[in-house]
Image (cartoon, grey):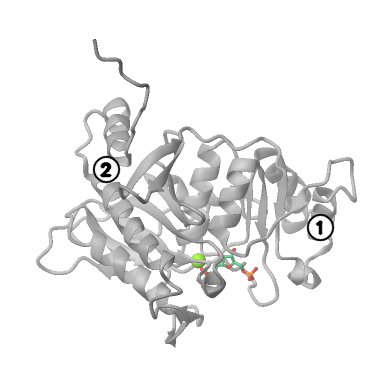
Amino acid sequence: MVHHTDVSVVTIERFIIEQEKRHAPQATGELSGILYDLALAAKMIANKVRSAGLADVLGATAGTNVHGETQQKLDVLANDIMIKALDHGGRLCAMASEEEPDIIPIPEGFRTGKYCLLFDPLDGSSNIDVNVPVGTIFSVLKKVTPGPQGELEDMLQSGRQQVAAGYVIYGSSTMLVYTTGQGVHGFTLDPSIGEFLLSHSNIRTPPRGRYLSVNDAYAGDWDESLHSLMRRYRGLEGSRKPLSVRYVGSLVADFHRNLLGGGLFAYPANRQNRRGKLRLLYEANPLAFIAEQAGGGAIDGTMPVLDIVPTELHQRTPLFIGSAEDVELARTVLAPALSGVGA
Ligand code: AHM
Ligand code: MG
């Protein structure tokens, strides 16, 4: 008689198929196809990021992006990889990228589909030259306009309408974390076989965090309610146990640590960035969907990020995201001041 071991190998492909069978038996498989293509793009970007110090891909290009920020060579590479890995599958009607000024149409000659993909190809890329983790963030929406090509209106839907969202973190290992509204699941890339394997199923974020992540170099711009909130997180006001401060400066890395360990990431508005720095469609919405699905939350100071109705492709938003109790504290301290009711 053969004795089997209890080794369980769940690739991302197998997991996606099984999830779909369980939760959407009538599905066409198109969304699953997008997720596989994203996993492929993630492996290709991971490969570039891993050897970045050796190949001539570090440093800035001569150009700037739509936000006037210097583009790193790897930003451009990662953007091209995302577009080329996703544009020909017949599942998307258009894409939008943090690095591109306008919607990216599906090239002529390729079929189009019913989904839109929005992404930040390489978040935190200003850190890349010093070997700090970076990430890719993505959001999938369903087309709402008639006709085969995606339009601006398809992109400007609130985060509540997302059908899938996730991120890839290129850290000491490469992980892909995503949700389709059925919990949050994490896969670690096994570099020896080039497959993402299920390593973190049904991630739940602790209700109260251990970490506070905020760039307090901008504290001079904060109003009194924000100062008070930060004093509470630090245990200097009120009776809370102080959080430990951790700030990588790479959103995906800060978010991922806080998702697993619990915590609050804040990027409020500041003098330079009056509406905040982070982009609603490429950064805040997908991470807010993950946070809510993991039992946490995300607000812009007053309202849930997922309820904001966007008016611009590259709209920015202040962001307070993480463990439920820490986000709730932010809301109770900030909302009265921001809505003019008094602190
Ligand atoms: P990017 O999309 O241009 O890389 O900018 C976003 C990054 C985030 O990863 C990070 O949270 C934030 O900028 C850090 O900004 P700051 O240096 O102002 O704290
Ligand atoms: Mg970014």
Q: Quadrant of residue 282?
A: bottom left
Indicate the amino acid at tag 2.
Ser
Instruction: Point out the residue furthest to the top here.
Output: 1
Q: Position of residue 261 (x, y in %)?
A: 64, 42
Spatial separation of the CA atoms under disc 1 and disc 2: 44 Å
Q: Is residue 222 visible?
A: yes
- x and y, in percent, of residue 85 in the image: 25, 61
Kind of residue at disc 1: Ser
Quadrant the C terminus occupies: bottom right
Frontmost of labels 1 and 2 is 2
Per the rendering, the mark at residue 112 is none
**Residue nearest the observer in this picture, 338 or 165:** 165
Horizontal placement of 211 versus 163: left or right?
Answer: right
Q: Residues within 10 Å of mark 2 (few under 14, many from 20)?
A: many
Q: Is residue 7 above or below residue 242?
A: above
Q: Residues within 10 Å of mark 1 (few under 14, many from 20)?
A: some
User: Ligand 1, what quadrant?
Assistant: bottom right
Using the rendered view, name the quadrant where residue 210 is placed: top right
Q: Position of residue 129 (x, y in %)?
A: 53, 75
Dot 2 falls on a residue whose secondary structure is helix
Figure quadrant of the N terminus: top left
Q: Which image quadrant for residue 28? A: top left
Residue at disc 2, CB closer than 8 Å to ligand 2:
no
- Give the x, y percent position of residue 283: 50, 59
Which residue is rendered at x = 83% and y = 60% of the image?
227
247 on left or right of 44: right
Give the numbered dot on residue 32: 2
Give the residue pinned by disc 1: 225
Task: Name the foreground residue: 232 vs 167.
Answer: 167
Q: Earlier in the sequence, mark 1 or mark 2?
A: 2
Q: Residue at x 90, y 51 (%)?
A: 236
